[in-house]
Amino acid sequence: MRQRILITGGNGMLGRTLQQRLARHELAILDLPGADITQFAQVRDAMQAFRPDVVIHGAAMTQVDACESERERAFAVNATGSEHVARAAAACGARLIAISTDYVFDGALDRPYREDDPPHPRTVYGASKLAGERAVQRDCPNHTILRTAWLYGEQGPSFVHTMLKLGADHAAPPLKVVHDQRGNPTSTTCVAEVIERLLARPIPGVVHATCEGDASWYELACEIFRLRRLPRPLQPCATADYPRPAPRPANSRLEKAVLHEAGFPPMPDWRKALADFLERDNTMELA
């Protein structure tokens, strides 16, 4: 069934994929510079003009390190902005699918995080996204919070694009990549497929959506280099070797229990999704 769908952050990496995947629907894009989710009147007016059936809320400040130094801006976008979107969606009677992140967890568990595990963010980014989740839960009862992680997609920016660029320099010294953080590398195409299914079969509450299987950043880099036959040598290193303003979770793995219990098909294995992406985008320009 054709639906009216408004996508916030529609010009971002996931948003671009959604525009392609959901092209048969009637779409409206809410994104900078045309609209700012930190301004409630702009969000309200755009939704009232379009009257969406579904709102997919992907707009966010995702620069994890920048969030540490720009806390006020991070909360304005990720928390207050999400509140604005939730309030406006509820006023229109729209269903809201809000995109969230593994960073709401601290990464200390030794198993994948389930949807019902208590969040405990260690970063400003994670805390602001968790505040956004709570605003969605409070202000738009008809919602799904879709957590994903380690995303890459057409045009980037992403870890995959960075590795493709750095790996092409055969004269450079070995490239050191962190080997003590694990997660689920995930294609925006795979997330968009789940979202498309959620349009037809809504699941209320929190849902995790990442590709199956897990890897370290180093293992992901090795697979990228293998598939693209990149010449630069790789070398594993520890997180402590590269301190960053925002601490990275050692464990970003997400369990997809809710999707499984709802009878949704398993998401693709991360290796297959990566191979499909690199084959499909073999001639893509690298930033």
Image (cartoon, rainbow, N blue to C red):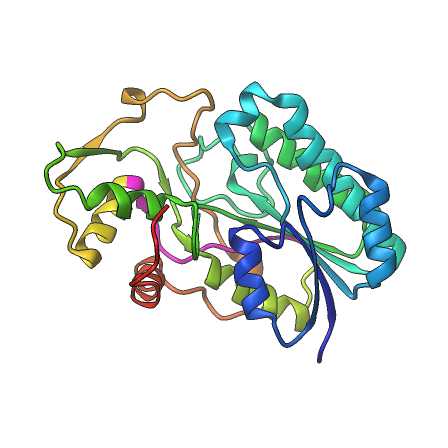
Residue 43 locus on image (x, y percent): 80, 47
Which quarter of the rendered picture does the N terminus lie within? bottom right
**Residue 242, magenta (yes or no):** no
Q: Is 253 displayed left or right of 236 in the figure?
A: right
Q: Is 273 displayed left or right of 6 in the figure?
A: left
Q: Is residue 123 in view from this perspective?
A: no
276 w.r.t. 230: above or below: below
Give the residue displayed 67% in from the left and 44% down from the top: 33
148 w.r.t. 80: above or below: below
Q: Is residue 265 in view from this perspective?
A: yes
Give the residue displayed 52% in from the left and 61% down from the top: 17
Residue 203 locus on image (x, y percent): 67, 62
Residue 274 locus on image (x, y percent): 33, 59
Q: How many marks?
A: 0
Q: Is 242 displayed left or right of 190 in the figure?
A: left
Q: Nearer the viewer, residue 39 or 132?
A: 39
Q: Nearer the viewer, residue 249 or 44?
A: 44
Which quarter of the rendered picture does the C terminus lie within? top left
Give the residue displayed 53% in from the left and 57% down from the top: 257
* Boundaries of the magenta span: 205-217
Q: Is 45 displayed left or right of 109 in the figure?
A: right
**Residue 212, magenta (yes or no):** yes
Name which quarter of the figure residue 173 lies in: top left
Farthest residue to the bottom: give it.
Answer: 1
Q: Nearer the viewer, residue 225 or 45?
A: 45
Residue 37 locus on image (x, y percent): 74, 42
Give the residue displayed 31% in from the left and 20% down from the top: 240
Name which quarter of the figure residue 198 lies in: bottom right
